[in-house]
Image (spheres, rainbow, N blue to C red):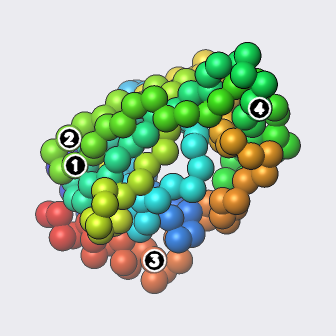
Amino acid sequence: MELCLSQVLSNWDEVEVRTVPNVMYQVVCPTNNTGEDIEYRFHWFLDCSETYIHNHRYAFDTYCLQGEYEERLWEISDGHSGTLSYKFPRTSGNKFGTHIPVPGVLRSVKQNHHFPGNTLHVEPNQYHSIVPIGGANSNVLTFDARRLCSTATEPTFVLSASDSIQAPTDEIRPATAQERQLVHEKLISLS
């Protein structure tokens, strides 16, 4: 993490910084062409109240640097209850496709506390969401390592108990100069 932070700060003008408006900033660490299939990122959640349950294309480990949240793991179960849940295909840019009905009840099956010094592992087939710990500041800074795999086939979805999503659908975009400055100052505070 320290090496990535040093590389990010010393090459700041070339570093890719993205934002999911009102949710988080993503800082992609330089790769140094080591041939590793691992992408390192800093994620700064401005509000870790994720509004939807989702999975990821790649497995990753997340190390909490500042703040804390609860990760909730979800599944659709009991397909014989007559209840329907819904899967929405997730496409690039934080957009969602048409819902797919799935028999069963959407329920939280496990919770994990993520706090400074803690590491969590997330698999592509694992649906999760995060929420702030009661009364805690919802700003959370993490360092993530994603194992990139050219044969990744796990589609990404958002799960919902409703056939419509009430989540913000602002597209991921490059950070503005003002946002970059804010993120730069945050990362400097770590060094």
Q: Residues within 10 Å of mark 3 (few under 14, many from 20)?
A: some
Which tag is nearer the camera, tag 2 or tag 3? 2
Q: For mark 2, what is the residue?
A: 118
Label of residue 115 in the image: 1
Earlier sequence position, callout 1 versus callout 3: 1
Three-letter code for the amino acid on which mark 4 is drawn: Leu
Label of residue 179 in the image: 3
Q: Regarding mark 2 in the picture, which secondary structure is present there?
A: loop
The span from disc 4 to disc 3 (Cα, nearest Å) is 41 Å
Please report the residue visible at 31 percent of the width from the left and 56 percent of the height from the top.
Answer: 133
The span from disc 4 to disc 1 (Cα, nearest Å) is 34 Å
Q: Is residue 180 above or below residue 71?
A: below
Is 178 on the left or on the right of 64, as rendered? Answer: right
The quadrant the C terminus occupies is bottom left
Three-letter code for the amino acid on which mark 3 is drawn: Glu
Which tag is nearer the camera, tag 4 or tag 1? 4
Discs 1, 3 touching: Cβ within 8 Å: no
Q: Is residue 59 above or below residue 21?
A: above
Which tag is nearer the camera, tag 4 or tag 3? 4
User: Considering depth in this image, is 9 or 72 the residue closer to the camera?
Assistant: 72
Earlier sequence position, callout 4 versus callout 1: 4
Which tag is nearer the camera, tag 1 or tag 3? 1
Q: For mark 4, what is the residue?
A: 84
The span from disc 2 to disc 3 (Cα, nearest Å) is 27 Å
Is 136 on the left or on the right of 123, as rendered? Answer: left
Is 167 on the left or on the right of 181, as rendered? Answer: right
Residue 67, percent from left and from top: 25, 59
Residue 166, percent from left and from top: 70, 59
